Image (tube, rainbow, N blue to C red):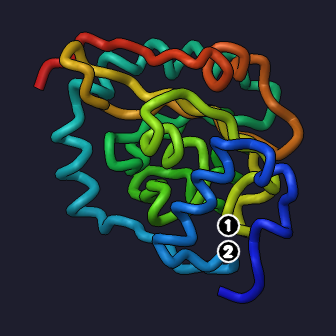
Amino acid sequence: MAGNPFLLAPEVNTNPLLSDSWSRCQRYGLDPATEDFPRLGAGELADRLASHRGLQQLAQPVVEALSRQVADLQSVVILSDPDGLVLHTLGDTQALQKAQRVALAPGNLWSESGRGTNAIGTALAIDDGCEIDGRQHFLTRNQNLYCAAMPLQRPDGSIAGVLDISGPANFPPPAHLWLGKSGGKANWNICG
């Protein structure tokens, strides 16, 4: 990894959530300039979607409601599994096209170890809601994004998945007030 990525985003040094995440990214051996990202093939994605059908059914009303709230804000709502694999992305046509270009589409893995500091992966790493905006993302490729995510928990406390809202950097949607800053977790009665 060339240079010190902490120098590129000084706010990382003053925010423990970010500095801890960026330190983990360095331990993972991530290069901020990487363009090599994990993505599942169609068959493996179909298997994973089938195994998370219950999560998708329970989350669908919330995903749809949030999607309506952010419809005019160039943003998408994303549901991922507990590994950070995107299961479902919902938004208007233009926002979905942009999401596809930055790999915020089903089959893409957004774990912190694979994509650096990002709301889905970091929410999983800390088991709490978080927001990541612009240059707070570890990977340069993601620094044009704003993301807020919250883990979805089963009754036993294990993580069932993550709910995320993503859009253009420095343009957070109003839903960020409950999603990223709540400091809470969404409890879901998830079977299986």
Q: Secondary structure at mark 1?
A: loop
Q: Residue at x 43, y 50 (%)?
A: 106
Residue 84: image location, x then y, percent: 40, 48
From this viewpoint, is residue 120 visible? Answer: yes
Residue 31: image location, x then y, percent: 61, 79
Q: The residue under label 2 is which amino acid type? A: Pro
Residue 152: image location, x then y, percent: 38, 24
Location of mark 2 (residue): 32
Say few, some or many: other residues with alpha carbon within 10 Å of mark 2 (under 14 / 14 to 19 / 20 or more): many
4 shown above or below 42: below
Q: Residue at x 64, y 51 (%)?
A: 99
Location of mark 1 (residue): 139
Q: Quarter-wise, where is residue 60 in the image? A: top left
From this viewpoint, is residue 100 visible? Answer: no
Q: Nearer the viewer, residue 19 or 170?
A: 19
113 shown above or below 75: below
Q: Secondary structure at mark 2?
A: loop
Residue 118: image location, x then y, percent: 60, 50
Dot 1 and dot 2 residues touching (CB under 8 Å): yes
Q: Nearer the viewer, residue 64 or 5?
A: 5
Q: Residue at x 17, y 51 (%)?
A: 47
Q: Quarter-wise, where is residue 32 in the image? A: bottom right
